[in-house]
């Protein structure tokens, strides 16, 4: 559920479910990390550029933000929630949890 932080912590199974229904996926990792693989359909917005790109993020559908382990994406979700976004979801455990759950990664383009 949405806690005091203003965003929801979600597991890989939930992310797969809402991604299939059109959720917006954002990868806040570095270029070097992204080169190792991404979740299909995700767009790359490095964490340090998020304040400049916040207006590009939709408010009318769920948004899942992820990083390697879930720490930077939690910061990103908190930042977006502080800007009035109430649709933020953090992938708990990050892309590492996604891969450990048997979900596919694709090579970044």
Image: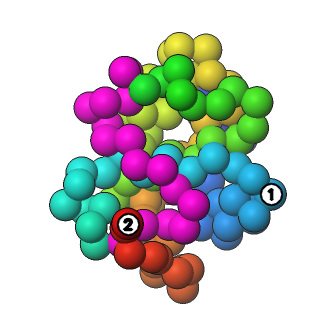
Q: Which residue is mark 2?
A: 109
Magenta region, residue range: 37-52
Is residue 71 visible in the rendered image? The answer is no
Q: Quadrant of residue 68?
A: bottom left
Residue 44: in magenta span: yes
Mark 2, Cα crowd under 10 Å, few <14 / some 14-19 / many 20+, is few
Q: Quadrant of the C terminus?
A: bottom left
Q: Quadrant of residue 49?
A: top left
Residue at point 53%, 14% (across, down): 83
How many numbered badges does the structure rendering display? 2
**In the visual, does 90 lie left or right of 48?**
right
Looking at the rendered structure, the secondary structure element under dot 2 is: loop
Q: Position of residue 55 (x, y in %)?
A: 53, 20
Looking at the rendered structure, the secondary structure element under dot 1 is: loop
Residue 59: in magenta span: no
Residue at point 56%, 51% (across, down): 25
Vertical placement of residue 54 versus 37, above or below: above
Residue 1 vs residue 27, the one in the foreground: 27
**In the visual, does 57 lie left or right of 72?**
right
What number is the disc on residue 21? 1
**In the visual, does 91 lie left or right of 87?**
left
Q: Residue furthest left?
A: 32
From the image, state whether disc 1 or disc 2 is nearer to you: 2
Q: CA distance from mark 1 to mark 2?
A: 23 Å
Residue at point 52%, 56% (across, down): 42
């Amino acid at each position: 559920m949405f806690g005091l932080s203003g965003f929801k912590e979600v597991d890989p199974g939930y992310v797969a479910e809402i991604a299939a229904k059109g959720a917006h996926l954002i990868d806040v990792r570095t270029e070097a990390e992204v080169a190792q693989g991404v979740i299909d359909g995700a767009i790359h917005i490095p964490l340090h550029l998020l304040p400049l790109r916040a207006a590009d993020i939709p408010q009318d559908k769920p948004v899942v933000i992820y990083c390697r382990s879930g720490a930077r994406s939690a910061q990103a979700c908190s930042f977006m929630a502080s800007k009035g976004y109430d649709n933020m979801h953090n992938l708990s455990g990050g892309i590492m949890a996604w891969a450990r759950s048997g979900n596919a990664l694709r090579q970044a383009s």
